[in-house]
Amino acid sequence: MRIGPADLDALRLWLGWRVGVGVLAAATAGIVRAGEDGFGWPERWYRWDAVHFAGIAESGYAGEPTGVPNEAFLPGLPLLMRLGSLLGVSEVAVGVVVSLIASAVAAVALARLAERAMAGAGRWTVAAWLLAPTAVFLAAPYTESLFLALALPAWLAAQDRRWWAAGVLAALAMTVRVSALFLLAALVVQWVTDRPRVWTGLPWLLLPALPLAAVLLAQHAATGSWTAWWDAQSSQEWNRFLTPPWEAAAHTWEAAFTPGRVDAMFVWPFRLELVAMAVGVGVTVWCLWRRWWGEATFVGLNVVAFAFSYWFFSVPRAALVWWPLWIAVAGVVKDRPWLQAVWLGGSGALAAAWAVTFLSGGWAG
């Protein structure tokens, strides 16, 4: 719990980023003229998945779905929204506050992981992460920040062989994002490859199965189906049903480059889906080269899951939780001032464009 220099660096970067995102949100509200579309602030954050999280918070899984069945989402963030609403705070405002606090926790944990990986990398790892093209989702009432605020401390605990803490944190993460399944697999690999192996740690890694079972039971109670989550993911809105990777790549390419295949606002996001998948493969190979078996498992399973969908979808946003990616970026830029300027300028511009797109109601993945 001690706050060191690298932690303070991370928090300073986080604070500057958070102020910048707030300015962008206010400016977007003014430019779009919120009165015309009925959205002010913080309702400007009430977009896309946030609508589902708020709906689950209000009515549970039995509530009316909005385009996509609510069962596609896990209950961790909606539960926090529900608790806040009982105190008279709107669900979306609670979600923004949760992401605010969770992103600060995640920034500190990410800096610590990076410093363990390579001295002096903490600052640049956090900077790369906060200026990632899709970083607006770290501030939105989405699950990325909350998941990382649990997953990154879980990984730190595993590195310290505090398996009980890793198991508890992974169990909490399991209520937030399905990516926790890949985190659990990575923790098991980390335990298997750890020397000396602590056998008493293994039972703790079974703990995340409990919240997963609870989610399945809750969804079954609401829908009568044990496959409600999978059915929702496979719905027409997302088409996330099992598809061979080469066909998924072809479908994504068609959506990205065939005129009229998808609505115009989806064209560039689909192009960046292809880039993000290539980056995911590269990061997995890099982790294997460094013999980071657990990290390679986490990123690799993410990539495989996206590869077997009808098309690649929401991969750039999911890349926010691939912490080895941001450590790799830091390793490349931290000793190259010219590359730092190129990276910060290019990625920062993309991040601003992505934020304005999301805040004005466009699709940003």
Image: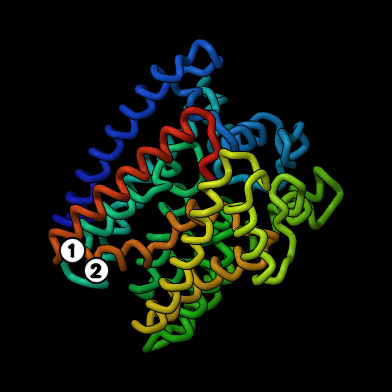
Q: Is residue 15 left or right of residue 301?
A: left
Which quadrant would the N terminus be assigned to in this image?
A: bottom left
Q: Position of residue 239 (x, y in %)?
A: 72, 53
Q: Nearer the viewer, residue 312 or 250?
A: 250
Q: What residue is at 51 percent from the left and 64 percent from the top? A: 277
Is residue 175 shown above or below 275? Answer: above
Number of the label disc, if any, that sits on residue 203 = none
Q: What residue type is disc 2 on?
A: Gly
Number of the label disc, if any, that sits on residue 331 = 2
In this orientation, does residue 104 appear?
yes
Q: What residue is at 35 percent from the left and 23 percent from the top? A: 27
Is residue 171 shown above or below 237? Answer: below
Q: Nearer the viewer, residue 45 or 80?
A: 45
Q: Nearer the viewer, residue 94 or 32?
A: 32
Q: Is residue 131 left or right of residue 45?
A: left
Q: What residue is at 35 percent from the left and 38 percent from the top? A: 352
Q: What residue is at 71 percent from the left and 31 percent from the top? A: 59
Q: Secondary structure at mark 1?
A: loop
Q: Position of residue 168 (x, y in %)?
A: 49, 61
Q: Secondary structure at mark 2?
A: helix
Residues at badges 1 and 2 in contact (C-beta under 8 Å)?
Answer: yes
Q: Position of residue 242 (x, y in %)?
A: 74, 65
In this orientation, does residue 172 appear?
no
**In the displayed image of the protein, which residue is found farthest to the top?**
35
The mark tally for this picture is 2
Q: Residues within 10 Å of mark 1 (few under 14, many from 20)?
A: some
**In the displayed image of the protein, which residue is found farthest to the front?**
259
Q: Residues within 10 Å of mark 2 (few under 14, many from 20)?
A: many
Q: Is residue 234 left or right of residue 353?
A: right
Q: Which residue is mark 1?
A: 334
Q: What residue type is disc 1 on?
A: Lys
